Amino acid sequence: MRCRWPPHRTLRGNDTAQKLFAKFAPLRAQRDLGVLDARKLEEIGLAKTERALTLTVDGTPKTFRLAAPASGWGAPYLQRPSDSHVFLLGPALLSDLEAASSRLVDRRMHTFDVDGFDRVVITSGNKSRAFVASGQPPGAVQLAPVDAPGTPDDFARNWHDRVWRLTPIEFLGRGESPPGLASSPAFRIEYQRAGKPVGELSMAMTPDHTWYARTELTPGWTRMGGGLESLAEEAAKLTAPPR
């Protein structure tokens, strides 16, 4: 399902998107108003609208014209170009699509919480270091070097807590890459449980010092903003051989 507002992106939908999808399968109207004259089309916002809704069913796209915003979302009108029939849709059926980029996107970075892993491996450049992890939501994860599991590392805990609490600003679509993004990440975290990987996070920067993240859940890169250079510097310190 795609509402024709740029940019076109393939993103992961949230629970609201799942509920909305059910209203489109099948798509039913409250009334078929038939073919309307030019005056009526002007009145309901379909005369000069540039809005469109495209549904792809079994690989075949079907496009409908949507009434212009001035007609309001409370009683949306839709026109089928193949026969010019106009339909009255149910109240609020299209309201979520108006702000789809914020209301329908799954904004989670991971599906697990701080109690979903027992080990993290931090990589910076060609150096990696593993830490035993333990935590309960909503607290911070306690980290300790694998060779000294009884000695918590406060520096590592605070660093990871800052990374864990970063908030995405914008989700890019599948296959979309920011211009000038570094070819290799500034640092990477692998999350493990019982010796098996359960997730990961990679952080990379563009020349304008904008940071992007990617995880096992996101469809592509996620813009995180700037000013995160200190996280990369501290990752290098965390992965340096202990003195």
Image (cartoon, helix red, strand yellow):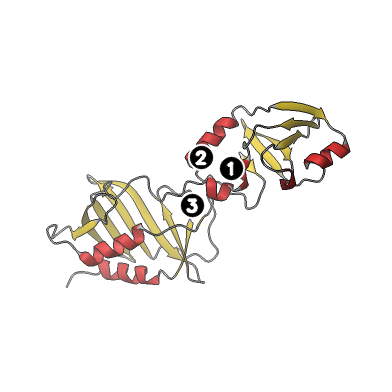
Residue at the image position 71 percent from the left and 42 percent from the top: 52
Q: CA distance from mark 1 to mark 3?
A: 23 Å
Residue where numbered disc 2 is placed? 16
Q: Earlier in the sequence, mark 2 or mark 1?
A: 2
Q: Nearer the viewer, mark 3 or mark 2?
A: 2
Disc number placed over residue 202 in the picture, else none: none
Disc 3 is placed on an element classified as loop
Residue at the image position 78 percent from the left and 34 percent from the top: 81
Residue where numbered disc 3 is placed? 220
Disc number placed over residue 96 in the picture, else none: 1
Please say if the residues under marks 2 and 1 sit with CB atoms less than 8 Å apart.
yes
Q: Earlier in the sequence, mark 1 or mark 3?
A: 1
Residue at the image position 14 percent from the left and 57 percent from the top: 149
**Which x, y percent locates residue 129?**
24, 61
Residue at the image position 61 percent from the left and 42 percent from the top: 95
Is residue 128 at least partly visible in the picture? no
**Which x, y percent locates residue 4?**
67, 46
**Which x, y percent locates residue 210?**
49, 67
